Image: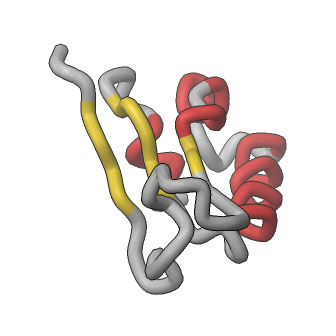
Amino acid sequence: MFIGAFLEDANIRVIGIDGKAAMPILAAFDELCRTTWIDTSACRRRDRVRWETKPTGRGWFYGHHNHLHVSWSAP
């Protein structure tokens, strides 16, 4: 629900999460969307959640097990 609340804002550019936690987090997110606990507009922005499962240099791989990053675009 925390990620869903961020994604209600159309200006969210990207949310970076831990790669090892991504699948369980997104499964829970999808279930909350299916049961309408998360707003439909936020559910459509699911692709803005990013992660890496190996170090590719984008910066999402190391050290995201206890926090996430949120980036907004200019309105």
- 29 to the left or right of 31: left
Quadrant position of residue 33: top right
23 and 34: which is toward the camera: 23
Task: From the viewer's side, name the closer residue of 75 and 42.
Answer: 75
Q: Quadrant of the N terminus?
A: bottom right
| Residue at point 44%, 59% (across, down) | 59
Q: How is the image coloured?
A: secondary structure
Quadrant location of the C terminus in the rendered image = top left
- Locate residue 20 relative to residue 66 in the image: left or right: right
| Residue plotted at (49% across, 76% down) | 62
Placement of 36 over or under 27, stated as above or below:
above
* Extreme residue toward the top, this view: 75
Q: Is residue 71 above or below residue 62?
A: above
**Residue 27, image x, y percentages:** 81, 59
Location of residue 39 in the rendering, given as x and y in whole percent from the top left corner: 57, 34
Please tell me whether residue 31 is drawn above or below residue 62 in the rendered image. above
State the residue at coordinates (78%, 69%).
Answer: 24
Q: Looking at this view, is 36 or 26 the one in front?
A: 26
Q: Quadrant of residue 10?
A: top left
Q: Residue furthest left?
A: 74
